C-alpha cells in the first residue's frame, strides 16, 4: 500500500509539472491553432537562467529560498521576452499562411533556441545547485520531500491563477473571444495582436516556473532537457483535449500518474512466473526466478498506449469539445 | 576543420576533372611532382588519426576529455618530430562527434574511412564502437578504444580492433565480487539504461552475484535519457534490497542516486565506470556520499605524473576519466607506426598486435582478441565529495588500494 501511495505521490509531482508546461501548449493552440513546438525550449531556458542566477548568488550568503526565488524571478521575465520575441518575429508574419508553415517554423525556432542555449550554457549536463535543504516527511509509509510539497503547491496555485485570469478578467474574456473567432473579436474592438502576444507571454512565464521546478526537483539541467519534457507535456495537452485549459491540467496530472503506476506495476503484472500455466513451462522460473515480459523500460510506451486509447474513443481528448469549425 | 575538408574535396574534384579532360597534362603534372619530391620532403607529410566521441549530449564532457587525451599525444609527437620512411611527418587529429548515437557512429566511421585516416582512437561508447567496427575492419584501419568496455567489441574476430581499457566481463565481476565479499548483501537490485554498455555490465554483475548465492531482483530498465527514476525506485524500495547496482552513465546515475535517498532507501548504491566521476557529487548532492563504483584500469590520478602535468598545462583542468587511456591509445598508434617505419595500416598493424608499451596507465600489451592483458579494475567510494580508490581487483584478486600502490612501488 505504501508503495502504491508513493507511486501516486511521485506521479502527482511529475504530472503537475507536465500540467503547467502543457498549459503553454494548449493556450497557444486554443488561440491560433499552432502547436508551438518551441515551448519545451522556453522551459529549458527558464531552468538555465535560474541555474546561472542561483549559482551567481550562492556565494552572497542569502537564505536559500530567497536565492531560488530571485532565480525564478529572473527566469520568468527572460522567458516572457523569449515568448514574445518568438511570437512577434517568427509566428506573427505567418499568421495567415497555410498551417504547415508556422508548424515548421515552430520546429525551426525550437532548434534555434536549443543551439543558442548550447552556445551559452555549454553542452555539458549542469548540476542544478541543490541549496534548499530537503526534508523528507513520511505519510502512511510514503516519503514526500519539502521540494515535492512546494512543487505541488506552486503548480496548483499557478493553475488556479490561470483559471481566474482566463475566466474572470477582461484579458481572459478577450482571449476566449479571440479563440472563438479572431476576425469577429477584432471587429468588436479587441486588439488581437496584443491578446495573442499576451497568450504567448503568459504561457512562457508558466514555462519558466516549470523549468525552475524541474531543475530543483531532479537536480539537473541541460540544453536538451526541453525536448522530452515538451513532448510529454504536449501529449498531456492532447490527452486532456488540446486547446482546453482544464483539459491540459487534467491531462498533465493524469499522464504523470499513469507513467508512475505503469513503470511501477507493469513488470509485476507481466512476470509470467506468477501464472501457473507459464511457470511450469519457462525454465527461468525454476527456484523463484522471474520471466518478465514487459519491464519498467516500457514505462513510456505504457503512457502512450493510454494516450492512444483515449484518442481512439475520444478523438478530441478527455475534456475537448467537438467543435465544427476547428480542425 | 570543415574548411580543410572542403578544400580537400575541391582539390579531389579538380584532379578528377583534370584527369577526365586531358591525360597528358595530368601525367606531366605527376612528373613535375616527382621532380619536386626533394623539396616536398622538407614540408611534412600529413598523417591523419581519427578520434570519435560524443561532443554533444549528456556525456559530452567525457567525450571532450577523451579528445583532449588524444590531442595531447598528437601534439607531443609533433613537437618531438617523427620521421617515417625518411620523411618528416605531421600528425593531424580528425575529431568527430558521434553524439553517442549508433547511427551517427557508423556515419562518422565511414566519413573517417573516406577521409583516409590511418588509425582511429575511439569510440567512447560501446554502443557506437560495436556498429562502427565492421566499417573500420573492412577498410583495414586499426582502431583502439580507450573506454568501450562491452566484451562484444573484441569478440567479433576483427584483427584491427583493440582496447586499452578493461572489459565489462572483468569490471562487472570485480565490483560484484567486491560488493558480495565486503558488504555481504542478501538481496541486490540491478538496473540498467538499456544501452550496450549498461546492459553488458549489469548482466555481468548479475551473473557474478548469483554465483555468489546473492538474491538478485528482476532487472529494471530506464533509458540513457531517463531523469525520473522514482517509479522504479519506489517499486524496488518495497523489496528492501541491501544494495543497488546501476549500469549507466553519470548523467542518469546522479538523479537515480538522489531520488533513491529521497525515497529513504538505505541500500548501498553502486555503479560502473560510466558513473564513477566526481560529478556524481554535484549531480546527487549529499546522497552521493558512500556510493561504490568501479573503473576499468587505474584512476586518472594514478596515471603517470608526466601525463597529468602535461594535461593540466595544456587544457587547464584535470583529466576527468578516460583521457589517460585515449592518450595511450594514440601513442600506441604512433609507436607502432614508428616501429614499422610506415603509416600504412597494413604495415604497422602487425607491430601494434605485438607491441609492448609503457604508457600513462602502465604497461600495455594486447592478447589475441585485442584486449589489454591483465587489465586492472579499481573500486572507488565517494568520500567528502571526491571519489577515492579503496581497492584494486587484478586477475581475480582483490587488494586494498594501499596494498596495490605498495605492490606498484616494489615492482618499480
Image: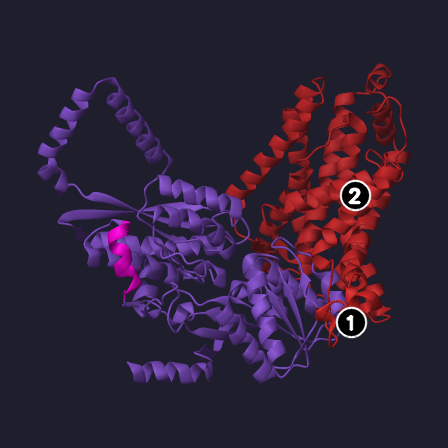
Chain colours: A red, B purple
Q: Left or right: B311 with respect to A129? A: left
Q: Which residues are magenta?
A: B345-355
Q: Chain of mark 1?
A: B
- Residue B349, magenta (yes or no): yes
Find disc 2 in the rendering and name its residue. A236
| Residue B386 picture location, percent across and down | 51, 71
Q: Residue at x 65, y 65 (%)?
A: B191
**Towards the viewer: B390 or B23:** B23
**Towards the viewer: A231 or A181:** A231
Q: Residue at x 31, y 26 (%)?
A: B13
Image quarter (top left, top right, bottom left or bottom right) of the N terminus of chain B: top left
Cβ atoms under marks 1 and 2 closer than 8 Å:
no
Q: Is residue B13 above or below residue B134?
A: above
Q: Is residue A41 above or below residue B307?
A: above
Query: Is there any visible trace of residue A309 in the rendered image?
Result: yes
Give the number of the disc on residue B238: 1
Q: Left or right: B66 with respect to A193? A: left
| Residue B5 picture location, percent across and down | 35, 35
Helix or strand or loop: what does disc 1 sit on? loop
**Towards the viewer: B170 or A181:** B170
Q: Left or right: A165 with respect to A96? A: right
> Which quadrant of the figure has residue A308?
top right
- Residue A277, magenta (yes or no): no
Image quarter (top left, top right, bottom left or bottom right) of the C terminus of chain B: bottom left
Q: Residue at x 34, y 40 (%)?
A: B115
**Towards the viewer: A16 or B243:** B243
Amino acid at each position: 500500500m505504501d508503495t502504491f501511495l508513493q507511486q501516486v505521490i511521485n506521479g502527482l509531482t511529475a504530472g503537475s509539472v507536465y500540467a503547467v508546461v502543457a498549459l503553454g501548449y494548449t493556450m497557444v493552440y486554443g488561440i491560433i491553432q499552432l502547436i508551438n513546438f518551441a515551448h519545451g525550449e522556453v522551459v529549458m531556458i527558464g531552468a538555465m537562467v535560474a541555474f546561472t542566477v542561483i549559482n551567481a548568488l550562492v556565494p552572497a550568503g542569502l537564505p536559500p529560498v530567497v536565492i531560488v526565488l530571485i532565480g525564478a524571478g529572473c527566469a520568468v521575465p527572460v522567458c516572457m521576452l523569449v515568448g514574445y520575441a518568438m511570437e512577434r518575429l517568427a509566428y506573427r508574419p505567418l499568421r495567415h499562411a497555410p498551417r504547415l508553415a508556422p508548424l515548421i517554423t515552430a520546429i525551426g525556432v525550437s532548434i534555434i533556441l536549443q543551439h543558442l542555449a548550447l552556445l551559452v550554457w555549454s553542452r555539458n549536463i549542469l548540476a542544478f545547485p541543490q541549496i534548499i535543504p530537503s526534508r523528507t516527511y513520511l505519510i502512511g509509509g510514503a516519503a514526500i520531500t519539502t521540494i515535492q510539497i512546494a512543487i505541488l503547491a506552486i503548480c496548483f496555485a499557478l493553475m488556479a491563477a490561470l483559471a481566474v485570469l482566463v475566466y474572470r478578467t477582461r484579458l481572459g474574456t478577450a482571449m476566449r473571444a479571440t479563440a472563438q473567432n479572431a476576425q469577429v473579436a477584432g471587429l468588436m474592438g479587441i486588439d488581437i495582436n496584443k491578446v495573442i502576444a499576451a497568450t504567448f507571454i503568459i504561457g512562457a512565464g508558466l514555462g519558466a516556473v516549470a523549468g525552475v521546478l524541474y531543475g530543483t526537483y531532479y537536480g539537473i539541467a541541460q540544453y536538451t532537457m526541453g525536448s522530452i519534457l515538451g513532448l510529454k507535456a504536449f501529449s498531456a495537452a492532447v490527452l486532456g483535449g488540446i486547446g482546453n485549459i482544464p483539459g491540459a491540467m487534467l491531462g498533465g496530472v493524469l499522464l504523470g500518474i499513469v507513467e508512475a503506476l505503469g513503470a511501477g506495476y507493469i513488470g509485476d503484472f507481466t512476470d509470467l512466473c506468477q501464472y501457473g500455466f507459464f511457470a511450469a513451462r519457462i525454465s527461468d522460473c525454476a527456484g523463484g526466478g522471474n520471466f518478465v515480459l514487459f519491464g519498467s523500460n516500457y514505462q513510456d510506451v505504457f503512457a502512450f498506449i493510454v494516450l492512444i486509447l483515449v484518442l481512439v474513443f475520444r478523438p478530441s481528448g478527455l475534456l475537448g469539445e467537438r467543435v465544427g469549425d476547428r480542425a | 576543420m570543415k574548411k580543410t575538408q572542403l578544400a580537400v574535396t575541391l582539390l579531389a574534384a579538380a584532379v578528377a576533372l583534370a584527369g577526365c579532360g586531358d591525360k597528358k597534362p595530368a601525367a606531366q603534372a605527376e612528373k613535375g611532382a616527382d621532380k619536386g619530391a626533394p623539396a616536398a620532403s622538407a614540408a611534412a607529410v600529413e598523417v591523419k588519426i581519427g578520434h570519435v566521441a560524443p561532443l554533444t549530449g549528456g556525456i559530452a564532457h567525457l567525450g571532450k576529455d577523451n579528445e583532449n587525451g588524444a590531442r595531447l599525444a598528437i601534439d607531443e609527437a609533433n613537437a618531438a618530430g617523427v620521421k617515417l620512411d625518411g620523411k618528416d611527418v605531421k600528425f593531424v587529429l580528425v575529431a568527430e562527434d558521434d553524439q553517442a548515437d549508433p547511427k551517427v557512429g557508423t556515419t562518422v566511421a565511414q566519413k573517417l574511412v573516406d577521409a583516409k585516416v590511418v588509425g582511429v582512437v575511439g569510440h567512447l561508447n560501446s554502443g557506437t564502437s560495436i556498429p562502427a567496427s565492421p566499417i573500420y575492419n573492412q577498410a583495414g584501419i586499426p582502431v583502439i578504444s580507450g573506454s568501450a568496455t562491452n566484451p562484444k567489441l573484441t569478440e567479433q574476430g576483427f584483427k584491427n580492433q583493440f582496447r586499452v581499457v578493461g572489459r565489462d566481463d572483468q569490471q562487472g565481476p570485480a565490483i560484484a565480487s567486491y560488493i558480495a565479499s565486503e558488504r555481504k548483501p542478501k538481496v541486490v537490485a540491478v538496473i540498467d539504461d538499456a544501452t550496450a554498455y549498461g546492459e553488458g555490465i549489469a548482466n555481468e554483475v548479475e551473473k557474478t552475484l548469483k554465483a555468489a548465492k546473492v538474491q538478485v531482483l528482476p532487472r529494471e530498465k530506464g533509458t540513457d535519457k531517463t531523469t525520473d527514476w522514482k517509479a522504479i525506485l519506489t517499486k524496488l524500495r518495497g523489496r528492501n534490497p541491501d544494495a543497488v547496482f546501476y549500469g549507466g552513465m553519470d548523467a542518469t546515475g546522479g538523479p537515480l542516486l538522489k531520488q533513491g535517498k529521497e525515497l529513504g532507501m538505505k541500500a548501498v548504491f553502486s555503479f560502473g565506470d560510466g558513473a564513477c566521476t566526481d560529478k556524481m557529487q554535484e549531480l546527487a548532492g549529499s546522497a552521493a556520499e558512500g556510493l561504490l563504483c568501479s573503473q576499468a584500469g587505474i584512476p586518472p590520478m594514478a596515471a603517470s605524473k608526466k601525463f597529468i602535468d602535461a594535461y593540466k598545462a595544456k587544457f587547464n583542468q584535470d583529466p576527468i576519466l578516460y583521457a589517460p587511456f585515449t592518450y595511450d591509445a594514440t601513442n600506441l598508434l604512433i609507436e607502432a607506426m614508428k616501429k614499422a617505419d610506415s603509416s600504412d595500416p597494413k604495415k604497422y598493424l602487425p607491430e601494434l598486435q605485438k607491441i609492448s608499451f609503457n604508457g600513462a596507465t602502465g604497461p600495455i600489451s594486447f592478447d589475441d582478441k585485442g584486449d589489454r592483458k591483465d587489465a586492472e579494475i579499481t573500486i572507488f567510494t565517494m568520500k567528502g565529495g571526491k571519489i577515492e580508490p579503496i581497492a584494486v581487483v587484478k586477475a581475480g584478486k582483490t587488494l586494498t588500494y594501499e596494498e596495490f600502490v605498495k605492490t606498484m612501488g616494489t615492482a618499480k
